[in-house]
Image (tube, rainbow, N blue to C red):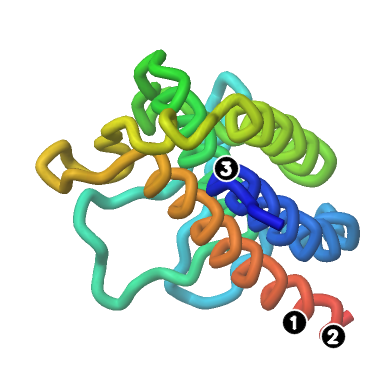
Amino acid sequence: MSTSRTELLRWQADLTWSLFTYHLDRLDPGDFLREPAAVCWTVHEDADGRWWPDWAESEPDPVPVPTIAWLTWHIGWWWTTAVADVRGTGPPGRTEIAWPGEGAAAVAWLRELREEWTAVLDGLDDAALDRPSAYPWDAEAGLTVGHTAAWVNAELMKNAAEIGQLRLRYAAER
């Protein structure tokens, strides 16, 4: 049986998502903003009720340990921008993407983005995967939409593992 590159990327995305939902389905609302270390990145609510992440243009030393809230914002940010880039609509800036809030709001946002991403993947054929893409790299990197799709899957796996590890730790401490 022959599998197209698009089918393989979709299979990988579905597998990663299924592993991630184990943790998403078990998150306690109090887990999101819990600070796992003295040096951490989180999200902060402004006077208008919008949530914004901690951020630095160059990685600080020591690297802050992110909260689950920050990690879910991070997934939402790169997924939103990847979907826009692959669709050719131009990704929004990082500061345009606010976190929707803890608990069910964050999980629903990620589920919606997952649906958008799988629709994007389902609309790609091998020729589309070969189109140039500068996201999330610069144009000189010479990479393609296929590279972006593979990166999205890898980034989701990494962030899912980070959230899963924090969730397991918090559950063990209850």
User: Residue 169, labelled with which disc?
Assistant: 1
Position of 170 relative to 158 (above/below): below
Residue 58: x and y in percent read: 20, 57
Foreground pick, 124 / 67: 124
Q: Which residue is mark 3?
A: 6
Q: Is residue 166 visible?
A: yes
Q: Looking at the image, do the residues carrying marks 1 and 2 touch, with CB atoms under 8 Å apart?
A: yes
Position of 166 relative to 160 (above/below): below
Q: Closer to us: mark 3 or mark 2?
A: 3
* Residue projecting furthest to the bottom: 172
CA gap between label 1 and label 2 equals 5 Å
Q: Quadrant of the C terminus?
A: bottom right
Quadrant in which residue 94 is drawn: top left
Q: What is the crowding at mark 1: few (fewer than 14 residues within 10 Å), some, or many (at least 20)?
A: few
Q: Residue at x 17, y 41 (%)?
A: 138
Q: Which residue is mark 2?
A: 172
CA gap between label 3 and label 2 equals 39 Å
Q: Is residue 100 visible?
A: no
- Residue type at mark 3? Thr
